[in-house]
Image (cartoon, rainbow, N blue to C red):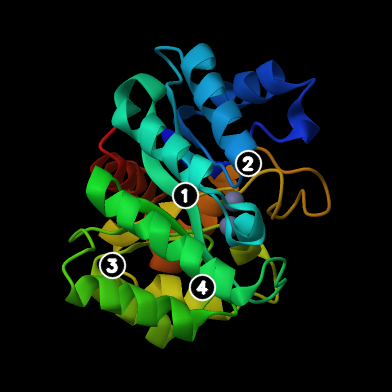
Amino acid sequence: MALIDTHAHICDERYSDDLDGILLRAREAGLTRLIIAAATMEESKEAIRTATEKTTDDLPLWCMAGVHPHDADGFTDGDYDQLKNWLSDRKKNRIVALGEIGLDYFYDLSQRETQILVFRRQLELAFEADVPIVLHTRDATKDTLMILEEFQRNRMLRSVPGVCHCFSGSEETAEKLLQMGFYLGFDGPITFKNSKRAPFVISMTPPDRLLTETDSPYLTPVPYRGKRNEPSYVGLVLDRTAEIKGMDREEMAAAVMDNACRLFGI
Ligand SMILES: [Zn+2]
Ligand SMILES: [Zn+2]
């Protein structure tokens, strides 16, 4: 059974002395593909470097590049040009998506107006470069949907726009995103006992639109909750997803792998 982690921040400094160990344990856990997540320009640069240097035949690595709403305040024209430049040679750079981009009104680490501006600029860039986005949205559903719907109306959104990663919204939001063509990504929290809404959303999401991810080093699934997360735990998220869907583990893993390959063109 082949597994994929579609969202892991393996360039995080918490792994700096253990990167080879992380990748070894991922292989042992059955991972055959991995997408490195990025949230800042620095992390994007590291993600490209790691994906390029550490990719192997049995565990090929790809990455995303983009700026998270947390860092929107620091986004410059130079960053925009750099992203564009990386995307212009995305095969070589092993970039399969622009992300994480979006809005985060939970932490509000950047001004909301700036978050919106930076989200819009990166949405334009993704459309021009014809790459899927990895959407991060938290406590900002209304504005996120408004912007995406506007882009869709103006035909500036791909028919398959990307994945809403770590989906934690309502059933209605899920329905709107699915209708727009988005995939929904789920993480460790679906294994928590008190998790009710996400499992419900999974139960209504078609199996050909589900993705599993770890968001390592965050969001560690049970029974490792409280410890540092890593890609080798993605099977726990997959198991819970299969359980909710009433599917076999193998069947679910194959569906998720197909979905990831289709969305990211890997
Ligand atoms: Zn995120
Ligand atoms: Zn992330």
Mark 4–mark 3 CB contact (< 8 Å): no
Determine the CA span between mark 3 and mark 1.
24 Å
The amino acid sitting under disc 4 is: Pro
Indicate which disc residue 199 carries: 4
Task: Rate crowding at label 1 as few (under 14), some (14 to 19) or many (20 or more) other CA atoms within 10 Å.
Answer: many
Which residue carries the number 3 mark? 206
Q: Taking 50 as reference, is 55 left or right?
A: left
Determine the CA span between mark 4 and mark 1.
25 Å
Work out whether mark 3 precedes mark 1 in sequence or the reverse, and give the earlier one: 1
Residue at image location 31% in from the left, 41% down from the top: 264
Mark 1–mark 2 CB contact (< 8 Å): no
Which residue carries the number 2 mark? 233
Q: Nearer the viewer, mark 1 or mark 2?
A: 1
- SS for dot 3: loop
Mark 4–mark 2 CB contact (< 8 Å): no
How many numbered callouts?
Answer: 4
- SS for dot 4: helix
The N terminus - image quarter? top left
